[in-house]
Amino acid sequence: MIIDAIGGLGIFIGIVVLYFLSCIRFIFEYERGVVFRLGRVLPKTKGPGVIMVFWPIDRLLRISLRTQVDDVPPQDIITRDNVSVKVNAVVYSRVVDPHKAVLEVEDYRYATGQLSQTTLRSILGQSELDELLSERERINRLLQEIIDRQTDPWGIKVSAVEVKHVDLPETMKRAMARQAESERERRAKVIHAEGEFQASTRLRDAAAIIEEHPMAMQMRFLQTVTDVSNERSSFVILPVPIELFNSFLSKQAT
């Protein structure tokens, strides 16, 4: 009987040891464990390191504290100026309170994704197309603030929201291309007109100097003759101003 008692005690001890070994859990550094004991959540999270989960009375839920990147699928949006576009975005979020992430919402990642889609449609629908294309940073900041404020009761911190791609219809792309081409032509005409104005100003100054010094006209004429002589032309016709002969005529008169 003693041997049977010792054998039964050994079996009992072995079962107890196996039970405690099966209760050992490892929590990684980037995780925290939320434990429910008899249906009630324990006030403190577990981990990181080795913890004990006494099943079947305990239930462990692992929550990752790393930043999670969720892609918002393309959304059909009509802007304030009635332009239909498709926009997708990226949401960067992480859990800051594991208890709230478990108790306040059923699936915090799914809930954050759905909230991001509705917020994206709402905010971009209030913006015009030019704002969507040129003020991307301001829109990203506004989206981040709104989504972060709404996910705060769930223990979720949204660190950034980035509008990734804006898909325009082909008709709008062609219209924008024509607008850009017209803008380039306008700038070219303005630059050309500015150059003509500056050139006319300099010509006016040159004419005033030549009027004060008549010999400057002769020097300019000789310079023109020199330039033309370098050209490979068969015939060269040069108009000769009468003023060039005034000095010779005056000497003969004397």
Image (cartoon, helix red, strand yellow):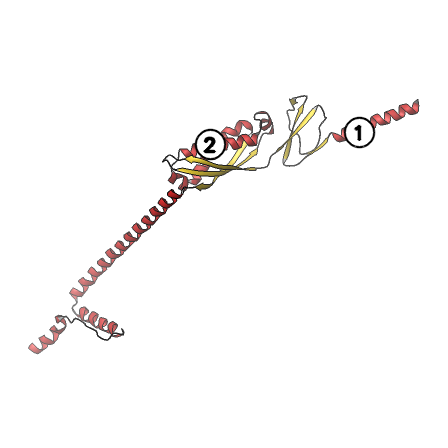
Q: Residues within 10 Å of mark 2 (few under 14, many from 20)?
A: some
Q: Label 2 belongs to which residue?
A: 119
Kind of residue at badge 1: Val
Which quadrant is the C terminus positioned in? bottom left
Mark 2 element type: helix
Kind of residue at badge 2: Thr
In the rendering, at what x and y percent does residue 47 appear?
A: 66, 32
Q: Residue furthest front?
A: 171
Q: Label 1 belongs to which residue?
A: 17
Relative to residue 249, is residue 71 depicted above or below? above
In the rendering, at what x and y percent does residue 15 appear?
A: 81, 27
Looking at marks 2 and 1 on the same chain, the residue that comes earlier in the sequence is marked by 1
- Residue 254 lies left or right of residue 192; in this view the side is left
- Residue 29 lies left or right of residue 230; in this view the side is right
Residue found at x 43% / y 37%: 139
In terms of depth relative to the viewer, which is nearer, 212 or 90?
90
